[in-house]
Amino acid sequence: MDAGVPSTTGKFKSEKPHHHLNYHQRLLRLHYFPLSKFLSWSLFAAVILFGLFLISPHSPSALRFSSTTERRSLRGSYSAASWGGFEWEKRVRSSARIRRRPSGLSVLVTGAAGFVGTHASDALRRRGDGVVGIDNFNDYYDPSLKRARQALLSRSGIFLIEGDINDGPLLRKLFDLVAFTHVLHLAAQAGVRYAMLNPGSYVHSNVAGLVSILEAARTANPQPAVVWASSSSVYGLNTGVPFSESHRTDRPASLYAATKKAGEEIAHVYNHIYGLSITGLRFFTVYGPWGRPDMAYFSFTRDILAGKTITIFEGPGGVTVARDFTFIDDIVQGCIASLDTAKKSTGSGGTKQGPAQLRVFNLGNTSPVPVVELVSILERHLKVKAKRKVVKMPRNGDVLFTHANISSARAELGYQPTTNLQTGLKKFVKWYLAYYPSTAGSSVAKKRGGRGSSSS
Ligand SMILES: O=C(O)[C@H]1O[C@H](OP(=O)(O)OP(=O)(O)OC[C@H]2O[C@@H](n3ccc(=O)[nH]c3=O)[C@H](O)[C@@H]2O)[C@H](O)[C@@H](O)[C@@H]1O
């Protein structure tokens, strides 16, 4: 990371409040201030102070989620100060350069150190597209995994900027430097159940962050086309199966789902007012190598190898919980096909010139698998028997079942998933054991010493 002086001068400007006046000036102001005005300003100040108290770390209502959010926002402001400078700009331009003429893309990938972001960036670069990544490297899960993904991208010549999508000046700078043809917006606060612990982070990343990206895109000239990650969770309490894009999505079961649903409505606004071409992709439980440690297939693998008990949720009356698990390569294929088929935005410098494309697609596998079966497949690949504990699903935002209808993506994107859960998990386990070699030892030891303990 270059630590050059930021070239955006406005970045450090702050509104000067009245407290820069000296004591006498303030006294003078007060003297000539009419009493009614003085009283209303005092009331206003009291409300502000009370508000500040409420969001202060010492306020009881903030205690539940202050530590993580604070650490993140601190890191955010640090990274905001660490971009810019001649060398930095050179790296951005070079990374964005299209090697595949004449039809190549120049793509800004947000969340590029994330699971899907890394795979998609790498795939784009491999075919000669220009790619610039941005990621805030937050600690929702082990940041060292994100750094390892960054190193991977760096080896492919992709520059990954450490910065927050809420940093408007940084985004403007990037669009000043590069005429991105597309934005692949994957940065988000993921995870369904964590929303109960840290609701603010979902609003920050999935609502405010999305608006920040769309603002940058609509003011850019030329405007890029935007492809972004929505979620299968928007179907919430929908009962029609398989889930089709025309089904209801107005009954989310988690705050995570609600922020993704909000994102879809926000996308409509930016398409309608500014002529941005926008495609939302509803991902269905994506898994694979370099995946997210917070997800069940990953944490189950870790715990099975460590000999720890895993908790499997079941629905009311012993109903099996199932997911339409979708392998990462299939998702990347869907992302790239969305970029390739995205029509140009019609706006220019923030003004709409005509109707623009607005799409939403399910990207799933169309083959739901019970979570208990996922565990059995892992047991077979790891050759270790899991210690299972089945519990009634807590009221945590989870839904019982997901199943994608992908006919729309198939027809318009040529999307065709090709990897079943058995094969995909084999690839994941192979990666996991290579990436965490010390745990591989325990797998081999258990395999040698206790074959009887592994399921067939
Ligand atoms: O499809 C999606 O849109 C979402 O898919 C996943 O969410 P989820 O399907 O809940 O994935 P996991 O957290 O890996 O859970 C998979 C299944 O395992 C179950 N599970 C999870 C954890 C656990 O300890 N036990 C357990 O049985 C869950 O109930 C769920 O049925 C991702 O985590 C979300 O970020 C994503 O947006």
Image (cartoon, grey):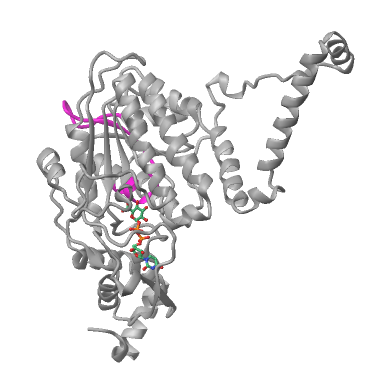
Q: Is residue 251 above or below residue 48?
A: below
Tell me what residue is drawn at x 14 percent, y 56 percent.
418
Please name the residue shown 50% across and 55% down the image: 196
Q: Which residues are magenta?
A: 97-119
- 114 magenta-colored: yes
Left or right position of 47 against 134: right
User: Residue 381, position in %: x, y?
Assistant: 26, 75
Residue 386 counted in the magenta span = no
Position in image of residue 75 (x %, y %)? 57, 42
Q: At which x and y percent is residue 85?
A: 51, 26
Q: Is residue 2 left or right of residue 49?
A: left
Residue 302 lies in quadrant = bottom left
Q: Which residue is located at x 48 percent, y 27 percent?
A: 168
User: Split into 4 quadrants, where in the image is the C terminus?
Assistant: bottom left
Q: Is residue 80 left or right of residue 276?
A: right
Asked if residue 10 lies left or right of residue 437, the reply is right
Against 250, residue 213 (above or below) is above
Residue occupying the point 18% across, 39% down: 337
Can residue 99 be spotted in the picture?
A: yes
Total residue callouts? 0
Report if residue 223 is visible in the image. Answer: no
Position above or below: 42 against 255? above
Quadrant observed for ligand 1 in the rendered image: bottom left
Q: Position of residue 293 (x, y in %)?
A: 41, 61
* Most distant residue in the top direction: 32
